């Protein structure tokens, strides 16, 4: 028996989707996250709401209102593919969920999903460019607290974030990068960054310890290094 758009009746009007998501898919991975909500009054599966959030953000949504509107604009088949068994919720439901959900668990799952989409480079593959960069998030400044500052590894080919971490208040991006770079395979990748990452220990870790490459800017705050690099590109001089 079929409902609208030829979808099985039990899927359209029931509370559960009868078809389990494929192993390794985004809904299947998101189903591993513990639900922070109480058991009473739950109308929507956690994995479905999180999948809708991820897809909404990937399409340009920058808030709960935009995420909810994007999902509701989709065809019913998309709702079911995300894991919804009924009409998706309003923006306030997403807002309450995301306020209670630990960010680290969601980031870990998304990183695993990205790992499947952006596999580690093989020995004969061209170098993959990965940008190392830090950003302070707008609108995250609370009273007597600092704004959220994230350091991320950004795959320049796919536009995906491979790894990221929240910057501790007692360190800088250079020190945090030493930890972040240990979370991905660097062999076959070239790490790009601005002048703050032009540090001996960081460059040595990329090349010697992990077999990667780097392309990092040098500015006037390191005059001796800058002069030495410029000298390498000057024409040779001979007294003869």
Image (tube, rainbow, N blue to C red):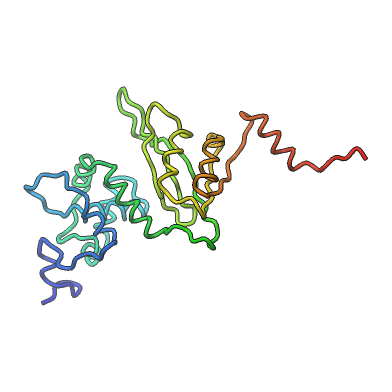
Looking at the picture, how far across and down is residue 37, in whole percent?
14, 44
Looking at the picture, how far across and down is residue 112, in whole percent?
33, 54
Q: Residue at x 11, y 71 (%)?
A: 9
Could you tell whether 133 is left or right of 94 in the image?
Answer: right
Above or below, 116 against 138 in this view is below
Query: Extreme bottom residue here?
Result: 1
Above or below, 31 against 203 in this view is below
Which of the image's four quarters has the N terminus? bottom left
Query: Extreme left residue here?
Result: 40
Could you tell whether 70 is left or right of 100 in the image?
Answer: right
Q: Quadrant of residue 134?
A: top left
Query: Extreme front residue here?
Result: 209
Q: In the image shown, does 186 or 217 lie closer to the viewer?
A: 186
Could you tell whether 55 is left or right of 219 in the image?
Answer: left
Q: In the image shown, does 52 or 218 lie closer to the viewer?
A: 218
Q: In the image shown, does 143 or 132 lie closer to the viewer?
A: 132
Above or below, 226 against 124 in this view is above
Query: Extreme right residue here?
Result: 240
**Number of disc labels:** 0
Which of the image's four quarters has the C terminus? top right
Above or below, 231 against 212 in this view is above
Looking at the picture, how far across and down is residue 144, in whole percent?
31, 22
Q: Residue at x 22, y 65 (%)?
A: 76
Q: Residue at x 23, y 67 (%)?
A: 77
Q: Residue at x 32, y 51 (%)?
A: 110
Looking at the picture, how far across and down is residue 4, in whole percent?
17, 71
């Amino acid at each position: 028996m079929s409902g609208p758009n030829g979808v099985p009746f039990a899927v359209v009007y029931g509370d559960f989707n009868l078809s389990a998501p494929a192993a390794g898919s985004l809904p299947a991975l998101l189903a591993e996250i513990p639900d922070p909500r109480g058991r009473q009054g739950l109308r929507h599966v956690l994995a479905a709401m999180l999948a809708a959030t991820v897809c909404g953000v990937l399409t340009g949504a920058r808030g709960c209102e935009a995420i909810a509107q994007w999902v509701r604009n989709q065809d019913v088949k998309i709702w079911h593919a995300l894991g919804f068994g009924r009409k998706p919720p309003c923006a306030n439901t997403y807002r309450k969920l995301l306020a209670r959900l630990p960010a680290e668990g969601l980031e870990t799952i998304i990183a695993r999903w990205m790992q499947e989409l952006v596999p580690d480079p093989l020995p004969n593959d061209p170098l993959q460019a990965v940008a190392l960069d830090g950003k302070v998030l707008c609108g995250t400044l609370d009273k007597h607290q600092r704004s959220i500052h994230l350091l991320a590894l950004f795959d320049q080919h796919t536009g995906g974030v491979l790894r990221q971490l929240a910057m501790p208040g007692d360190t800088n991006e250079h020190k945090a990068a030493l930890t972040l770079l240990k979370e991905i395979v660097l062999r076959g990748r070239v790490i790009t960054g601005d002048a703050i990452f032009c540090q001996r220990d960081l460059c040595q870790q990329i090349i010697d310890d992990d077999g990667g490459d780097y392309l990092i800017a040098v500015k006037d705050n390191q005059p001796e290094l800058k002069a030495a690099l410029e000298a390498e590109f000057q024409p040779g001089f001979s007294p003869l």
